[in-house]
Image (cartoon, rainbow, N blue to C red):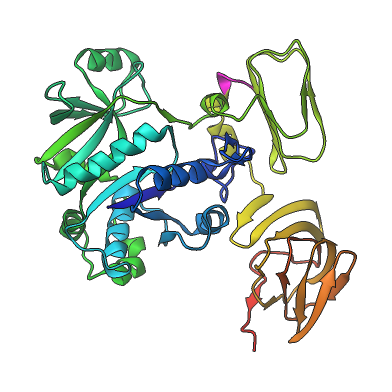
Amino acid sequence: MQIVLLSGGSGKRLWPLSNDVRSKQFIRMLKGTNGEPESMVMRVYRQIMETVPGAAVTIATGKKQVSAIKNQLGDTVNICVEPGRRDTFPAISLAAAYLKDVLGVDAEEPVVICPVDPYVEQQYFHAVKRLGELAAEETADLLLMGMEPTYPSEKYGYIIPEDSEAVSGVRAFQEKPDLETAKRYLSQGALWNGGVFACKLGYLLKKAHDQIDFTGYQDLYDNYSSVKSISFDYAVVEKEKSVRVFRYSGEWKDLGTWNTFAEAMDGETLGKVTLNETCENTNVVNELNIPILCMGCKNMVIAASGDGILISDKGQSSYIKPFVDRMEQQVMYAEKSWGSFTVLDVQEESLVIRIVLLPGHGLHYHSHEHRDEVWTVMSGEGRVILDEVERRVKAGDVISMPAGCRHTVFADTELKINEVQLGRDITVEDKIKHELT
């Protein structure tokens, strides 16, 4: 069985911990099995490996998220990269072509598609496994998972089943309703549409070719920008006649806002935080290396990072997106496949960055035309290469690289480096990659 995890979305609703590079699924705030906080993508991937042994996992995502995925899951996970954002039908079509042409998956193999970021327990993945088995048994061309609602929600679409059996035909699909309409749906036995479905790979490929003119994976990838942006629900699900819904009654949460995310946090606080005895129902996350003291805070969420500080009533935190949309700022922190970087200081003609390189990893061999750089090794050991000349480095070493100097660094142990960039035109575009000889 193949499992495709859809990892999209921007970093608006969980600002300032999330941004255009680090979406909510990469924030390490959930309780992990080893005592260390883990992210949604780490949790979901671990749960699949524990519950569905033998399943092959592919993550469909955009270019900006690839480094964070490799950082958190390693280099061996299959990643189908979207060249741009075109909604779920093009993304799933590209993933289907990737499975066939790149991974060599047979057209008869069942595929389960689901979001990468639900907050669930192991029971959910037993249901995912069962959904894939139903697809293999050909009980219908398309199998959906319907979540039994716990309240009349205005956030989800609804599936109206034909009966109350564990696997049922579908009477109708409904859009996200207002509160009164949601109550009426629940009285009809409606289920939340969680965006989880299963079918055979050949079915996905047929639907893709029916609506998109392409010859194979590479052709679709190369011409992805011209594909119509449309959701899989609109393009396929709501038009399908041979469709059934599998009822799921376990815990299922969409941690899409600070209010809901706080419920799943590993404790009330993360980082350097002190809550006095008068605080109630307050969660604080601090990624800064300075303390936060909270006194008399009630029903609040407070989050601090290099990107900003949020202080909000939990109910109001759901309305953060339009305010963040109006902010213009560069990304101050990001996880990369080789480690991470944090912007420490921004001046008119200088920039200071903290680079953390994981053992065995290194940067691209590169140069800059318009800026000089100085590296100060803060901790760890490794190797630098300057214009083809290699030297060992350790804590306390300082390396200067004028504009035009080709350079890279490799970590033998975890390597922390402060990088000072100096110049009148400091941009991410000023980077020329080279091959090491």
Quadrant in the rendering for residue 48: top left
- Number of numbered callouts drawn: 0
Query: Which portion, as a residue range, is magenta?
Result: 310-316
Q: Is residue 157 visible?
A: yes
Reply above or below: 300 against 431. above
The residue shown at (85%, 74%) is 400
Quadrant in the rendering for residue 223: bottom left
- The outermost residue toward the right is 396
Image coords of residue 64 (percent x, y): 52, 56
* Residue 308 is a magenta residue: no
**Residue 8 or 243: which is nearer the viewer?**
243
**Residue 72 or 303: which is nearer the viewer?**
72
Reply above or below: 319 against 94. above
Q: Is residue 311 visible?
A: no
The residue shown at (22%, 37%) is 144
The residue shown at (43%, 42%) is 47
Image coords of residue 90 (percent x, y): 30, 54
Quadrant in the rendering for residue 412: bottom right
- The outermost residue toward the top is 278
Reply above or below: 390 against 170. below
Reply above or below: 382 against 58. below
**Residue 173 or 190: which is nearer the viewer?**
190
Image coords of residue 404 (percent x, y): 75, 81
Image coords of residue 421 (percent x, y): 80, 65
The residue shown at (18%, 61%) is 107
Specify whether 363 is left or right of 122.
right
Image quarter where the C terminus lies is bottom right
- The outermost residue toward the bottom is 437
